[in-house]
Image: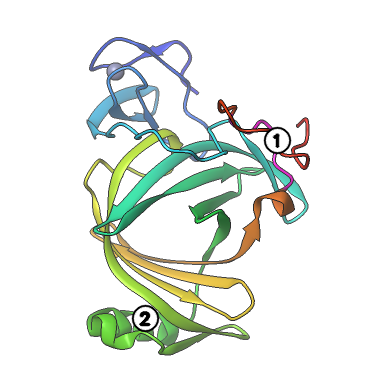
Amino acid sequence: MVGGANCPQCGAAVEAAMPGLPVTTCSSCDAMLVISDGQISAVGDSGRVPFDVSPLQVGTTLQVEGARGEIVGRERWGWERGSWNEWLLYLPGGDLRWVAEESGLYMVMSPANPRSDVVNRLKEIDRHDNAALGMTVQHENTVYTVADIKTIRCIASEGHLPEVITANFPRESIDLRTGDGGAFTFQSDRNGASCWVGRYYELAELRPGNLRAMEGWNRPRFEVSA
Ligand SMILES: [Zn+2]
């Protein structure tokens, strides 16, 4: 933990790094900062997260898999036809989940390590581009169908984050679905490839607390005081 650190770019006070999350953003100048061995360095531009109407914010709590975590960071990603938030949920003990927010649904994703033949099939699908829509991939006991293949870019990020993803960072993304809310995502970018598995939830199912206050918006009855 770094106490009382200052942004090397603008001098503003910066929050201490969280365990397992070496990257943070400066809320004054949008520098992306890496804190390591007590040293803080600016490594690029995090971008500025644009205004949106999400009920979530850094500080919102959500309950997943029986544990209540807190949102500590967010990345906003986009492509030619839209953009969305990916919120980083920090669970007790330091486990992380990404919560992708899409049309009022929340896809809670955990890191997955599929067998190498599954990864090779995903890489093959990536090369087929849109011709692969509708193809299937089996991970463990579940069959997922390719729903979406696209090149996305990080628009901006804020808060505490696990890796350096500066503004405009490009990534290839394949989204796969089951018919009953299951989701699997394959991502590849210059840092490597990763797989994520999870499912969709409605906000009420995540028993949220500390939602964002917005003018003209009534806080939902399912919000908890946690
Ligand atoms: Zn700064």
Q: Nearer the viewer, mark 1 or mark 2?
A: 1
In the rendered view, would you say 203 is above or below 37? below
Q: Is 121 or 117 nearer to us in this picture? A: 121
- Name the residue located 25 percent from the left edge and 85 percent from the top edge: 128
- Name the residue located 56 percent from the left edge and 38 percent from the top edge: 56
> Disc 2 marks which amino acid?
Leu
Main structural element of the magenta stretch: helix, strand or loop?
Answer: loop
In the rendered view, would you say 111 is above or below 56? below
On screen, residue 54 versus residue 75, left or right, reads: right
**Sequence-first disc among 1 and 2:** 2
In the rendered image, which residue does mark 1 sit on? 209
Q: Is 172 or 114 nearer to us in this picture? A: 172
Quarter of the rendering containing residue 59:
top right
- Name the residue located 52 percent from the left edge and 31 percent from the top edge: 18
Task: Give the secondary structure at mark 2.
Answer: helix
In the rendered view, would you say 77 is above or below 194? above
Query: Which stretch is magenta?
Result: 207-212
Label 2, residues with CA under 10 Å away: few <14, some 14-19, many ≥20:
many
On screen, residue 42 versus residue 90, left or right, reads: left
Task: Give the secondary structure at mark 1.
Answer: loop
In the rendered view, would you say 136 is above or below 153? below
In the rendered image, which residue does mark 2 sit on? 122
x and y, in percent, of residue 132 in the image: 32, 86
> Disc 1 marks which amino acid?
Gly
Quadrant for ligand 1 reads: top left
* Quarter of the figure that contains the C terminus: top right
Q: Is 204 or 108 nearer to us in this picture? A: 204
Q: Is residue 34 visible?
A: yes
Q: Which mark is residue 180?
A: none
Q: Is residue 23 visible?
A: no
- Name the residue located 50 percent from the left edge and 72 percent from the top edge: 184
Task: Tell me the CA gap for discs 1 and 2.
Answer: 37 Å
